[in-house]
Amino acid sequence: MDIREEVLQKAKAAKAASYRMAILPTGVKNAALFAMADALERRAELILEANAQDLEEARQKGLKRSYLDRLMLNEARISQMGEGLRQTAGLPDPVSQGDWSTVRPNGMEIRRIRVPLGVIGIIYEARPNVTADAAALCMKSGNAVILRGGSEALRSNTAISSILSKAAYKSGVPEGALQFVESTNREAVDVMAHLPEYIDVIIPRGGAGLIRRVVENSSVPVIQTGTGVCHTFVDETADFEMAVDIAINAKTSHPSVCNAMETLLVHRAIGEAFLPRLAEAMREKKVELRGCEAARAICPDMKEAVEEDWSTEYGDLILSVKLVENLDEAIEHINRYNTGHSDAIVTKDLGNAHRFQREVDAAAVYVNTSTRFTDGFEFGFGAEIGISTQKLHARGPMGLNELTSTKYLIYGEGLVRK
Amino acid sequence: MDIREEVLQKAKAAKAASYRMAILPTGVKNAALFAMADALERRAELILEANAQDLEEARQKGLKRSYLDRLMLNEARISQMGEGLRQTAGLPDPVSQGDWSTVRPNGMEIRRIRVPLGVIGIIYEARPNVTADAAALCMKSGNAVILRGGSEALRSNTAISSILSKAAYKSGVPEGALQFVESTNREAVDVMAHLPEYIDVIIPRGGAGLIRRVVENSSVPVIQTGTGVCHTFVDETADFEMAVDIAINAKTSHPSVCNAMETLLVHRAIGEAFLPRLAEAMREKKVELRGCEAARAICPDMKEAVEEDWSTEYGDLILSVKLVENLDEAIEHINRYNTGHSDAIVTKDLGNAHRFQREVDAAAVYVNTSTRFTDGFEFGFGAEIGISTQKLHARGPMGLNELTSTKYLIYGEGLVRK
């Protein structure tokens, strides 16, 4: 079967199933999630075999270690997938929840309820656990889902999705609601991106390149997630110890994730006193510093930051450092270079904290707190499908609510418009 | 100046202004809206002169009467624009309103507030009043706006937007927040659609052709509005008089608007009794009926409906009519052919009303009420920028809230992630 035909058939089947998914009782969805978790663990052997083949091929291709690590599954990681499915069963079902209602002067009753988006396309790269996580969240929120994983994880993903869909359908989930596209050619992504009649939204999960390709080339609405050039601004009145703790946490606790800090801005008035202390703490954690000219005048062993550094998501133990004149310059720099993800100020000044939160344009704006907290679990939403860095539809961590739309239900007794 | 350069400069200026717009006090915005209204009325003469030239040219081009009517301005219509601006000043300001907050177990305080989208691009066709209406709604919701109207209304739109922006800037609105693109070449739309760094969302207002062109060709997120293939299903238990009243209202009270009915579905069991009565009432209103075979067997003077009829937005006194076996077939037909706008059931059966509302996939699903009510004013939202027929971000009438996004503000006392 050719690529276009495969995607088209799966998209049509997903759309057809989506109408039944939308009215599936919560109990059936939860039972299916438990059955899916059990099936994954029961058939772990099969998944690990497929994964071993994927890993072997990836090694032969010479893919780097961090990539192999994302691809690799073991018993523990399969259990984590199962645990994720069970936790999703425990989250409240957003479907049909009312979020607004009114009665108009003519007696017309209007209520607005949450409804599923319909069919969600997820395009992702190396991590096979996304297959289970995304399926669980889409299913619990009443959506049909079309998964399209990266070529390197094809065997693993195929094994996982086949186990999941069998278990789901057996538990009463409508057939077709869980689709996995096996064509790993890029053309499959392009076909998905041009089926607005069957796919309601596409969420790309992966690197900036993948996301850009989907956004620039899609007639299906896209939610952009996960690129994070996050900043921390250390204000004149900051507590130095707190500022170092927050900076170290934001940079080093998990450098490869999107809520890690990439650029530190420091108020010029405290540069001489603060920067050496910061540099020493970063050196202990093996962080490479790249400074602006003024920062290097204070700490000459910093490398030189070039223009490109300010917009780079290192995802690594590298930090760019810039001295700024004042709060205005800090806000201006952030609004120019950030990706709308997470930015923080460390300060004791109430007015500056307030202005920073109002004026910085990002999904999450922190006061005296590490940017590392931007995450569905940390915000109390449970699992997340990603962190939206766009302003339309959803911003920040996207949980189950963000996988729904709304619908107005109107009741009258023979009302007509004058 | 070439087209690309014009649009790019205006988009950059709008983006720069958007940061100041986002924190503009409500009082300044309201004063500006009043000043804009006054200026429009004071300089009506200038607008009418420009409009007379547009009309003359349109007449020479042989554009049809309905088009000329949309283009035409007079004192009364200019007063209406002014009134719209003043009414928008009276609506509550959504910006900075909190809509959720929590304190996490570690003491982290999170609140979510509404923030403007940033820069909104509005692409529209003949009606010059959109220039004032859209500017008012975008401004009140704290957004910068780039307007791009149709070529036939260029002189009128240029006059209106120049009067509006002067009055706005004089009242403290940041310069650049209100942009009007004068290039009426299609290329201007394409350029706008490829500036995601400066434009946060594009809302096309106009015919299906315009909307499709923007959607299929945009790396800026788009909100689709305003195409409506709306249905009314007359169930077996319907009160005939109510059903006729609702159908007549939905079809004839304003046939050119998007919430007008295009297709009437009738339960087969009442076809013989109901259809002749309906047909007579429609004939009195000069509505052309196009029926399925079964409907024509009952009312032989109906024209024959062909496949294309079921997906056509006539925008005119034409109605397609189909007999269906039962509620299932009605829902299936609607979900296949509707545009996700508004659909209605006329019934006395509670179970059928409930199923219809749950299972029909549309922004507004009515029971015993005319679809004509889908409208910002009728829903109590005040003015609307359009009626979204997509599921992402906003669905149904879009008022001021729908022109905002959200932002998480987080406060901690030196919190770092474990």
Image (cartoon, coloured by chain):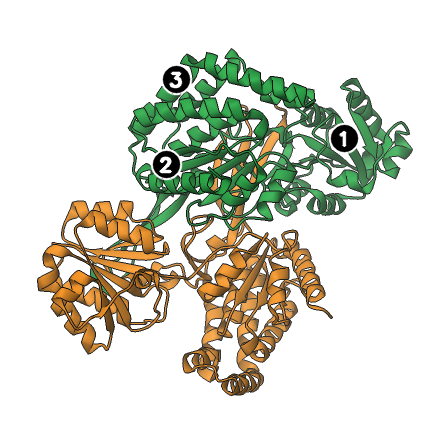
Chain colours: A orange, B green
Asked if residue A362 shows in the view, the reply is yes
In this view of the protein, which residue sits in the foreground, A86 or A2?
A2
In this view of the protein, which residue sits in the foreground, A39 or B336?
B336
Q: Which mark is residue B39?
A: 3
Q: Could you tell me which residue is drawn at 15 percent across and 70 percent down?
A: A300
Residue A404 against residue B394 in the figure, above or below: below
Label 2 packing within 10 angstroms: few (<14), some (14-19), many (20+): many
Q: Chain of mark 1?
A: B
Identity of the amino acid at label 1?
Leu
**Quarter of the C terminus of chain B within the rendering:** bottom left
Quadrant of res B310: top right
**Disc 1: which residue:** B319
x, y percentage for residue A261? 29, 64
x, y percentage for residue A253? 28, 72
Q: Could you tell me which residue is drawn at 16 percent across and 70 percent down?
A: A279
Q: Could you tell me which residue is drawn at 53 percent across and 70 percent down?
A: A131
Determine whether the residue tagged by mark 1 lies in a helix, strand or loop. strand
Identity of the amino acid at label 2?
Gly
Q: Earlier in the sequence, mark 1 or mark 3?
A: 3
x, y percentage for residue B58? 63, 22
